[in-house]
Image (cartoon, helix red, strand yellow):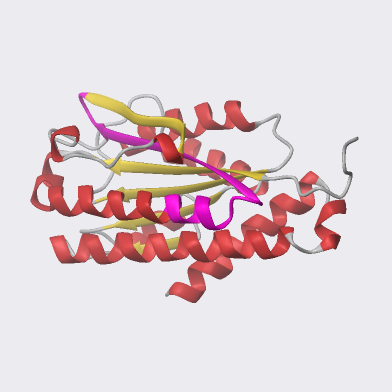
């Protein structure tokens, strides 16, 4: 007989959209190491919060000649560390296309799930300069819609005012990073800590009896609020 008080696990989709344009070559190893630290953090969260969460990983790298889904909604236990040969920077920065294509595909995947959190991080060392399918207005509208559905976004950028760029896309949480290996690693380390902070908050919420009666919309609002609080706490 089904236990009505059994905790329903949150399906957590960790989405990393990583610039692979030519200028990223200077911080190539740091980008690879930073993603691997993020992946290790998600694996740790899966083990620690296995009773309340199932974690999946999507990693998309992009340049103007290719958008590559290195991992596509893979259970975190099946995701392997990134290798330098998996990440070879070249050409230009179609940021809007990478975001639009990735986010729309993920939205289609999760739209019928009752308890889901999508945590998106965008990492780039330059501004949009090569998109063909999406523009700033369409990406802003898409992000605004997804935020009402409980999605959370962090924008991390170098060689730009990341707060201003993020704001233009209706992304609240933004970090600048120094255009160096140390800067990239430091920023991605902060992103890992922010994720772990959020996952801990989700676990605590799920342990409260009152959360059992929350509607889908109430959970979505709670996840968005907790993500903002986690970001602020790690700043």
Q: In the visual, does 97 lie left or right of 223?
A: left
In the displayed structure, does residue 20 sit left or right of residue 200?
left
Verify whether residue 31 appears in magenta: no
Residue 217 horizontal/vertical position (percent): 77, 47
| Residue at point 42%, 41% (across, down) | 136
Please tell me in which quadrant of the rendered image residue 167 appears.
Answer: bottom left
Q: Quadrant of the image for the C terminus?
A: bottom left
Q: How many marks?
A: 0
Q: Is residue 24 visible?
A: yes
Q: Is residue 13 above or below residue 157?
A: above
Where is residue 156 shown, x and y percent of the image? 34, 57
Residue 171 image offset from top left, x and y in percent: 49, 54
In the displayed structure, 193 sits above or below 115; it is below
Which of 34/226 is in front?
34
Instruction: State the residue lying farthest toward the left.
Output: 26
Q: Quadrant of the N terminus?
A: top right
The magenta stretch spans residue 58: yes
User: 25 and 130: which one is in front?
Assistant: 25
Rendered position, 61 above or below 29: above
Work out whether residue 227 or residue 173 is closer to the camera in this orientation and state it: 227
Which of the 4 image quarters holds residue 162? bottom left
- Specify start and end residues of the magenta stretch as a single range: 42-65
| Residue beneath the point at 56% across and 59% down | 199
């Amino acid at each position: 007989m089904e236990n009505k008080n059994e905790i329903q696990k949150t399906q957590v989709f960790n989405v990393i959209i990583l610039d692979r344009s030519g200028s990223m070559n200077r911080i190539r190893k740091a980008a690879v190491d930073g993603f691997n630290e993020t992946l290790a953090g998600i694996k740790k969260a899966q083990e620690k919060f296995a009773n309340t969460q199932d974690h999946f990983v999507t990693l998309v790298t992009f340049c103007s000649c290719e958008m590559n889904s290195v991992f596509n909604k893979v259970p975190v236990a099946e995701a392997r560390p990134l290798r330098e040969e998996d990440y070879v920077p070249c050409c230009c920065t179609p940021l809007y296309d990478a975001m639009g294509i990735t986010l729309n595909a993920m939205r289609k995947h999760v739209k019928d799930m009752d308890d889901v959190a999508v945590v998106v991080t965008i990492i780039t060392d330059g501004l949009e300069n090569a998109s063909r399918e999406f523009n700033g207005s369409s990406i802003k509208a898409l992000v605004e819609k997804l935020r009402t559905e409980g999605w959370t976004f962090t924008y991390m950028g170098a060689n730009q005012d990341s707060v201003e760029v993020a704001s233009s896309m209706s992304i609240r949480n933004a970090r600048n990073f120094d255009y160096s290996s140390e800067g990239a690693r430091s920023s991605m380390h902060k992103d890992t800590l922010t994720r772990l902070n959020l996952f801990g908050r989700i676990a605590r919420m799920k342990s409260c009896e009152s959360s059992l009666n929350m509607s889908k919309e109430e959970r979505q609002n709670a996840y968005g609020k907790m993500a903002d609080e986690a970001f602020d706490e790690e700043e």
